[in-house]
Image: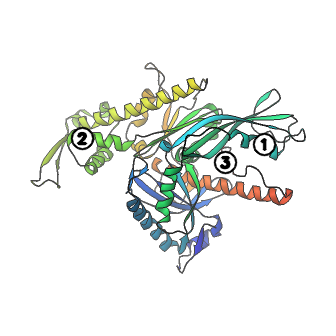
Amino acid sequence: MLFSQNSGKNQTMRRSSDAQKVLVAIDIGSSMIRLIAGEVLDDGQVKVLFYRETKSAGISNGAVSDLAALSNRLSTLVQVFESEFGVNLSHCILGIAGRYIESKNASGAATVQNKIVSLYDRDKAIENARSIRLTDGHHIIHVIPQFYTVENTSDITNPIGLSAMRLDVKVHIISCSRDQENNFRSAIAKISPNVLIDHVVYNGIAASDAVLTEGEKEIGVGLIDFGGGTVNVTVYDRKRMVFSFGLERGGSEITRRIATYFALPLSVAEQLKNEYGVAFPRMLSPEDKKRRFKITLNNSEEGEECIVSKLELADLIYQGLEDIFYSIRDRIESLSRKNGMVLSLGAGFVLTGGMAKTKGIEELAAYRLAPDSNSVVKVKIGKARGVTGFKEEPIGPDKSVCVGMLRFGKSVMNERNYETERAEQSGVKSVFGKIKDWFSREL
């Protein structure tokens, strides 16, 4: 159960359905912190019951820089939630940025016990795939099956019931920094020792589940979650997650470029970027290219003024975005060579995150993510699918991670219920009861 009742009188939660069906997720970003609560129906539709966001504090490039400041900001969100819904938060789902994850493609195998592949055989093969060497301080948070092989037949998506002597599996494993996860846990524990983090999900996976379709995964697609402090990248080919990684870069890096160039406070540079920024200088009209802003620096003793050219602003944003897209392209190409893979990204790339709101960013990405200067790739802005209850319509790309975290929580809840039923029926607990095989759904 995710909530315990307090003395509040709000009836929204009770009207929506049983409180046990309500999930809560906290998305701690470098720019914003978001708390979302809702139900995920059996068809994958997300019914949002509560959503609040606030500017981040105590976070820098996805890392905890001030535990007390972060905890205070989280406490404010939780208090608003508990006051509005008349419940005490006791459990939640938490996301982690890509800069703190590492991923590998690995193999596992198991001898089929009764010559017919059972659930136990499948789970045993996946469990054996977990036996890989991890970076010190990391632990596994996701093991995602790619495909199975029996005898000489590969590309099997569901081996249960097949005749075989041996079952092999290819998986994608994601680990995360235990220290960073513990820092997040500590921040939430300072709110209340009774608030527990049930699950940690890589933000790139959550964003993917919110915006991508099975059709896009089938023909190949790259998801780029472009946040303030980090960029999360997840790549699918033939419905398989093949790569996942993060960059310690994001919109904040571009904000700092602007602030340094014009000698502005970061808060003013961020406002200029969000209100007047474009991805391509050539998108500006002749009039806009000549336009200049006069900004009075209130923190200056003499009320010093700064002149900002809209053309120079656009050029700074362009340079920053270009560098990051080139880094993503080069990383994907490097991973492809390392794994001996030839990717076919028929659906191109999908952009989410706060920076995906930048005017013209998809056009720039189409050129800079392409394998060579003579080609372009498909790029679109991704928005969460199958969601009701948001006041904002359509839902912005910056909400993708928190919506996907709710779907992730639902899949884990389903898996837990499934494992409980299996244990009751067989009297034997599965060796691998937390496989997050939640990638087969399409709204």
- Residue carrying label 3: 436
Q: In which quadrant of the rendered image does the N terminus lie? A: bottom right
- Distance (Cα) linking label 2 and label 1: 55 Å
Residue sticking out furthest to the left? 302
Q: Position of residue 399 (x, y in %)?
A: 48, 51
- Residue 192: x and y in percent read 50, 69
For marks 1 and 3 on the same chain, the one whose residue lies earlier in the sequence = 1
Give whichever of discs 2 and 3 has the lower sequence position. 2
Q: Going by the image, does 358 lie left or right of 400? A: left
What number is the disc on residue 376? none
Q: Nearer the viewer, residue 331 or 430?
A: 430
* x 64%, y 56%: residue: 410
**Tag 2: Cα neighbours inside 10 Å, few (<14), some, or many (≥20)?**
few
Q: CA distance from mark 2 to mark 3?
A: 44 Å
Residue found farthest to the top: 374
Q: Which residue is mark 2?
A: 260
Q: Amino acid at mark 1?
A: Arg
Answer with left or right where residue 43 lies relative to residue 421: left
Residue 51 visible within the image: no
Residue 105 placement: quadrant? top right
Q: Which residue is mark 1?
A: 122
Q: Position of residue 361 (x, y in %)?
A: 40, 36
Q: CA distance from mark 1 to mark 3?
A: 14 Å
